[in-house]
Image (tube, rainbow, N blue to C red):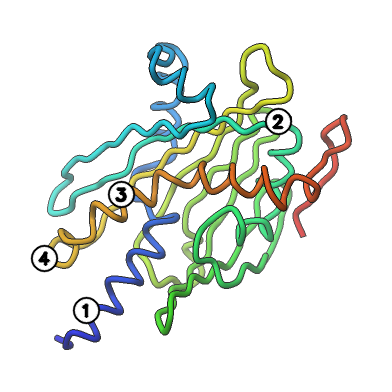
């Protein structure tokens, strides 16, 4: 069954991997959530937070069979044109800066608008690796992902998305919409870490904003036609 060291390793592997990309709801469900959000709009408080550059989170948790799925949607405005932010999302090498605790990123293959990327997360002696299948939709400025079933993983099934939208009335600002759900095994360890994982999962847009306002500000500057490819 393993001792305390085994449980601690499993704790961090789940935290690092699931806290970033693990999910178990279909991507179309997540996109439906965003489309509903767009129709009903933000509350006055949410809009004020977004205008001020603060993260807006909407948590979601539900039970499906023996597993609890949790995650939700989160939104963040960055002070960058949509074509610049789209460049960063198209470049898997940028994920080391857009997501926490990424030790390495490698593009395994690319066919058309799909790519498979190997990601490794590391915290101390604990490591978690998996292969994401990414699908890029330039018309929607959307990236959806799930695990590539043909390659090995240290985590459960995964799916999710990031969608970019121009901020109304501001060509120099972009709204990042992020959706994710995750399921991990029930038990005392999962119950202890679920709140922290839940928080990390929904803070991805804030990490993206920090990088795009920092070192990424000069790294990702698109031709104003927005057509320059960056997947390597």
Residue 161 image position (x, y, % from top left): 50, 41
Q: How crowded is the residue under tag 4: few (<14 C-alpha within 10 Å), some, or many (20+)? A: few
Which residue in the protein does label 4 denote? 188
C-alpha separation, residue under disc 4 versus residue under disc 3: 16 Å
Report helix, strand or loop for mark 4.
helix
Q: CA distance from mark 1 to mark 2?
A: 42 Å
State the separation of the CA atoms marked 4 and 2. Answer: 43 Å
The residue that label 3 is drawn on is 198
| Residue indicated by mark 2 | 82
Instruction: Name which of mark 4 and mark 2 comes first in the sequence.
Output: 2
* Residue tagged 1: 7
Report the Cα–Cα distance between label 3 and label 2. Answer: 27 Å
In this view, 176 is above or below 71? above
Which of the two labelled residues, at mark 4 and mark 3, occupies the earlier sequence position? 4
- Sequence-wise, the earlier of marks 3 and 1 is 1
Q: Tell which of 139 and 42 is nearer to you.
A: 42
Label 2: how many Cα within 10 Å (few below 14, some 14–19, many 20+) = many
Say whether disc 1 or disc 4 marks the residue closer to the N-terminus: 1
**Is residue 56 toward the left or the right of residue 103 in the image?**
left
């Amino acid at each position: 069954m393993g001792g305390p060291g085994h449980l601690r390793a499993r704790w961090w592997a789940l935290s690092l991997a699931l806290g970033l990309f693990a999910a178990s709801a279909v991507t179309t469900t997540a996109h439906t959530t965003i489309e509903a959000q767009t129709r009903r709009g933000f509350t006055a408080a949410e809009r004020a937070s977004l205008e001020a550059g603060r993260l807006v989170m909407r948590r979601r948790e539900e039970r499906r069979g023996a597993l609890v799925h949790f995650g939700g949607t989160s939104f963040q405005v960055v002070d960058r044109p949509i074509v610049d932010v789209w460049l960063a999302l198209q470049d898997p090498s940028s994920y080391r800066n857009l997501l926490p605790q990424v030790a390495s990123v490698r593009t395994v293959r690319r066919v058309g608008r799909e790519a498979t990327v190997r990601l490794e997360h590391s915290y101390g002696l604990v490591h978690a690796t998996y292969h994401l299948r990414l699908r890029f939709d330039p018309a929607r400025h959307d990236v959806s992902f799930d695990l590539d079933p043909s390659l090995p993983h240290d985590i459960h099934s995964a799916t999710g998305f990031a969608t970019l939208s121009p901020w109304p009335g501001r060509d120099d600002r972009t709204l990042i919409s992020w959706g994710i759900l995750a399921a991990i095994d029930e038990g005392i360890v999962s119950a202890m870490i679920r709140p922290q994982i839940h928080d990390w999962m929904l803070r991805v847009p804030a990490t993206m904003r920090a990088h795009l306002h920092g070192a990424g500000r000069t790294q990702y500057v698109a031709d104003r036609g927005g057509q320059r490819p960056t997947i390597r």
